[in-house]
Amino acid sequence: MQVSVENTSALERRMTIGVPAERIEAEVNKRLQQTARNAKIPGFRPGKVPMSVIRQRYEADARQEALGNVIQASFYEAVVEQKLNPAGAPAVEPKVFEKGKDLEYIATFEVFPEFEVGAFDSIEVERLSADVADSDLDNMLEVLRKQNVRYEQVERAAQTEDQLNIDFVGKIEGEEFSGGSASGTQLVLGSGRMIPGFEDGLVGAKAGEEKVLNLNFPEDYQNLELAGKAAEFTVTVNSVSEAKLPELDEAFFGQFGIKETGLDGFRAEVRKNMERELRQAIKAKIKNQVMDGLVSTNPIEVPKALLDNEVDRLRVQAVQQFGGNIKPDQLPAELFTEQAKRRVVLGLIVAEVVKQNELKPDEARVRELIQEMASAYQEPEQVVSWYYKNDEQLNEVRSVVLEEQVVDTVLQKAKVTDKAVSYEEAVKPAEAAQAD
């Protein structure tokens, strides 16, 4: 077998492969002999059909199959011989495909980029530390109470945080517009559900009262047909209800599966959950900084085949998440290109860090992570057992742990500064923190 390789770009390879005709014919003959043993042709007993008849009927198909197999096998042999690592399937272009002649074809494909991950010492990481203070716990209890709020009707003027039941009709230039009217809508004043001025305009209204609100849609309103336009809303207030927060009692605790422990036991359980959330938030922020640093300090070229595959995966995920009567390939690739590129780059870099440092999942950390995740459930032992009985789920946890070990490896050489912050700042999502 003859092989020659041409580098047509940083990652693309154009490989010409020649296979002796004898190998093709041997593969064709093998297939014809297999066919002859089972062929059922009128006038002949099974297994007794003359080879000339077999060739006449089946050689074309046998040769097509043989060529496909030989190309696949010879391509694999060639990349092993040339020490190449293809990043996707090759595009095959025949040069000589004639019977009795040596097979010659060109395989064009991309290879994985070759690089060494380095410059860990130039990566800067801010490592946050925080504690769950009693005031943080008190705030969380109030949040939980508000999430379980109920409303009771009152005979007074509406105040902020009251819930109103309203009917309204919206008009632009005297004409009703699509989506501008509703009946029996529940609206909590101050929730920010409606456009600016709508909820404020209902403060002080009473049940049975009608209010006319002259407002403007924001310039950046999501419905471009309404953005920036003036509108008149006629609102009828059907009822006014005030918020009633639940008491911190056994009935309330029972909603969270915590019974017969009293307030102290409930506070202890909530604190434990907050501490778990805190650890996860800090760990995630450190990981994001490390991954950002790896990407910025290790620029690599991405094989198009890998990028296309990742875009397709993101398309499928988007359709699964948002539903709708749309096929994944109908979503523009451009929507996912940047995210896909980052994921591919990170995948390549993380794999290289694992390879260079000979990392393997620490099974003790795997069990520790599973136990921590299981602690959020009422019967953690069953959750732990479930993970260890499901190889697919267990391997996912191993992958997470391996990524954590990559982060630890980078942190050993990175420029790490420690910063003590409040619980709220530590758990705040990175996007919100940047916006502030």
Image (tube, helix red, strand yellow):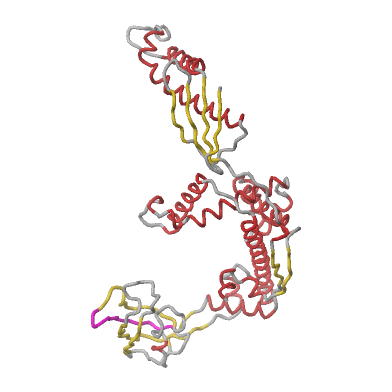
341 horizontally vs 349: left or right: left
Relative height, residue 187 to residue 303 (above, below):
below
- At 30% from the left edge and 85% from the top edge, which residue is drawn? 234
Q: Is residue 280 above or below residue 245?
A: above
The residue at 58%/52% (across/down) is: 345
Left or right, 170 with reference to 205: left
Residue 103: image location, x then y, percent: 47, 22
User: The N terminus appears in which quarter of the rendering?
Assistant: top right
Q: Which residues are magenta?
A: 163-175
Q: Is residue 42 above or below residue 208?
A: above
Q: Is residue 373 or residue 82 the one in the foreground?
A: 82
Which residue in the rendered view is the most extreme toward the left?
A: 175
The quadrant where residue 228 appears: bottom left
Residue 356 image point, x, y percent: 71, 46
Position of the C terminus by quadrant? bottom right
Q: Residue at x 48, y 51 (%)?
A: 311
Q: Is residue 155 left or right of residue 350?
A: left
| Residue 273 image point, x, y percent | 65, 68
Task: From the viewer's side, name the closer residue of 363 and 257.
Answer: 363
Residue 197 seen: yes
Q: Return the x and y of residue 240 as percentages of the image width and height.
A: 41, 86
| Magenta-drawn stretch, dominant element (helix, strand or loop) | strand
Q: Is residue 153 magenta?
A: no
Count of number-bearing discs: 0
